[in-house]
Amino acid sequence: MSPVKTVNEELIQVADKLKENVSETEKEQKQNINHCIAELHLIDDICQCIPESDTLSVLNEVQNDLFNSVIFACQGFYRNAHICLRSSLELTFSFIYYYDHHYDYVLWKKDYIDTKWSDLMSPDTWNLNKKFYSIILNCDTEKLKFDKFIDRIKCLYHSSSQSVHGKYEYMQTKLSNDNTYDPKLFDSYYKQFDGITEVLKSIIYLRFKNEIDIDPDEIKELDKILKKYEVIL
């Protein structure tokens, strides 16, 4: 009979395994990881341009979720990584809403109201209201179209929710029994990360387009994304 390990010994063994996973992931996915980190820096640059507001703490949590998702993915905790991605998506749209609805922000902060994803995605809400954005962007409402953009957001939200709700095929123990590096699972995560960060930086940029002052080449790329989804015709 093998000797029973102490809690400390178990934790050390787990930590060593996670370190091994990170090392292997970094070796095999170096280019993709570098892209993830570059995206985090770009989102931070965009966020730094937003006028001061106490609601920015919500956006700070978004950035923390994104960073944690990368860490989890590198460690082999792929389900946790996807959970963090969905949280970042929800909180980004919550931030955009609360930035201009401070009264609701105070109530939400004090736990008097809840934020509903369905409300944030509704065409009638401020988040994706054509009249509101026509004022911000100084253009006619006919120049704005959110249908394709909303469909993309809903698709990303749904795929991330599969992990959150513990659907059988998305459970961590089903995906990988011993939390080892899995190229297919990491590639799936990377694709989701890339899609969600594309949406996040685009909606933040769209809302604060007049305030964003970053590298002109990055501005061009953000404008390309909006045109790809036909947000601005």
Image (cartoon, helix red, strand yellow):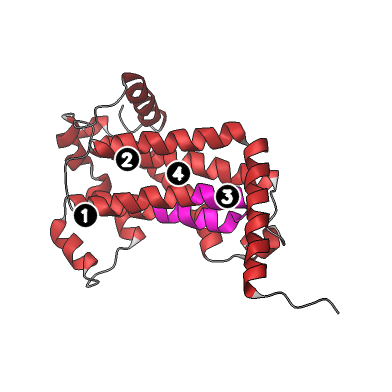
Q: Is residue 179 left or right of residue 104?
A: right
Q: Nearer the viewer, residue 229 or 204?
A: 204
Tell me the residue that label 1 is attached to. Answer: 98
Q: Is residue 67 above or below residue 163?
A: above
Q: Residue 174's x, y, as percent?
A: 69, 62
Earlier in the chain: of badge 4 and badge 3, it is 3
Main SS, magenta region, reads helix
As measured in the structure, the alpha-carbon distance from the residue carrying label 1 to the one carrying label 4 is 20 Å
In-front residue for pair 96/120: 96
Cα separation between marks 2 and 4: 11 Å
Q: Earlier in the sequence, mark 3 or mark 2?
A: 3
Q: Nearer the viewer, residue 227 or 170?
A: 170
Instruction: Judge from the rendering whether residue 223 lies leftward or rightward of residue 110; answer left or right.
Output: right
The quarter in which the N terminus is drawn is: bottom right
Residue identified by numbered label 3 = 73
From the top left corner, tell me how far across and down residue 133 is, in percent: 21, 38
Q: Amino acid at mark 3?
A: Ala
Disc 4 and disc 3: Cα gap in Å? 15 Å
Q: Is there CB contact under 8 Å for labels 1 and 2?
A: no
* Residue type beneath disc 4: Ile
SS for dot 2: helix
Which residue appears at 28% of the width and 68% of the height? Answer: 114
Q: CA distance from mark 1 to mark 2?
A: 14 Å
Residue drawn at point x = 58 percent, y = 58 percent? 79
Residue identified by numbered label 2: 203
Q: Earlier in the sequence, mark 1 or mark 4?
A: 1
